[in-house]
Image (tube, helix red, strand yellow):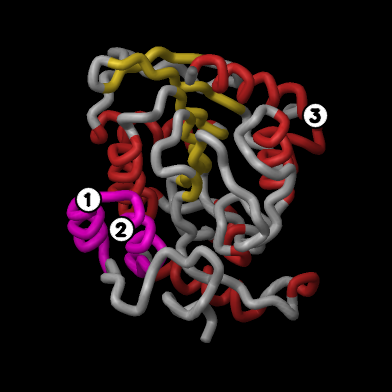
Amino acid sequence: MSFVPPGTGWPGDPASAETPVARDPAEVRELAGACSGVAELVARESVCRACPRLVAWREEVAQVRRRAFAEETYWGRPVPGWGEEKPRVLILGLAPAAHGGNRTGRIFTGDRSGDWLFASLHRTGFAALPTSVHAGDGQRLIGARVVAAVRCAPPANKPTPQERAACFPWLSREIALVADSVRVIVALGGFAWQAAWPALREAGYELPPRRPPFGHGVQVPLSYGGAGVHLLGCYHPSQQNTFTGRVTEAMLDEIFTRAAVSSR
């Protein structure tokens, strides 16, 4: 088996053997739209098989494994949103890493980007621990939730337009289900910034007539149900960005400190 079967004891597995599986984009939209709560949604996200290329890749990676993790069992399934069900801050990324979330079963967990992100979230009061290593490690988010625009690890970190579109209903429905409590949305990187706008619109947010360009620290006022909401741009803590100094610890901390203040 090149993935963890649902309901077999993986820590935090939201699904069971009875969780319905989406096998094409039409079923994704149907199953996502029918969800009445976050728990039901993440269970269905975590067993999705709608994109053949992504399914084949994530399971091949889980079977072949990286040498450093050769003795580990890989999750090998879509990585659902994770954190509080009524967050004040929603953090949006691109997609799981092949040997990060695809291995650990938790978004931004087990890779260098996650090391930077969770360390900053801990310093700014959004994470209980400074590290996020594996499911069941005791980490928890405080007033925050993390989601990805695409739930499966894509080859070369590049999902196709068709794959992004197929995964879109999971994202828009998750945003809608947590919208009543969210006051700040942080988009990690330009891809997440682009993905956020149509998902926010479908989830019922009121958006400005023109989409501002992405940039680190760009802050855009939105509203949902009459309440003010802020969309914040943040450079992605990828290895390329952190190694070159384009992203520093201080830059991440400044964004999440602003998120904390704006979400009160």
Q: Amino acid at mark 3?
A: Gly
* Callouts 3 and 1 close, C-beta under 8 Å: no
Q: Residue at x 35, y 16 (%)?
A: 222
How many numbered callouts?
3
The amino acid marked with disc number 2 is Glu
> Which portion, as a residue range, is magenta?
23-50
Q: Say if residue 8 shows up in the picture.
A: yes
**Mark 2 sits on what residue?**
40
Q: Main secondary structure of the magenta part?
A: helix
Q: Looking at the image, is mark 3 or mark 1 earlier in the sequence?
A: 1
The residue that label 3 is drawn on is 245
Q: Nearer the viewer, residue 26 or 180?
A: 180
Taking the spot 80% from the left edge, 29% from the top edge, the residue there is 245
The quadrant in which residue 141 appears is top right
Q: Nearer the viewer, mark 2 or mark 3?
A: 2
Is 27 colored magenta in this rendering? yes
Residue 129 to residue 246: above or below: below
Residue 40: where, in percent of width, then height?
30, 58
Cβ–Cβ under 8 Å for marks 2 and 1: yes
* Residue density around tag 1, few if under 14, some if 14–19, many if 20 or more, within 10 Å: few
Q: Which residue is mark 1?
A: 36
Residue projecting furthest to the bottom: 1
Q: Residue at x 67, y 27 (%)?
A: 124
Tag nearer the camera, 3 or 1: 1
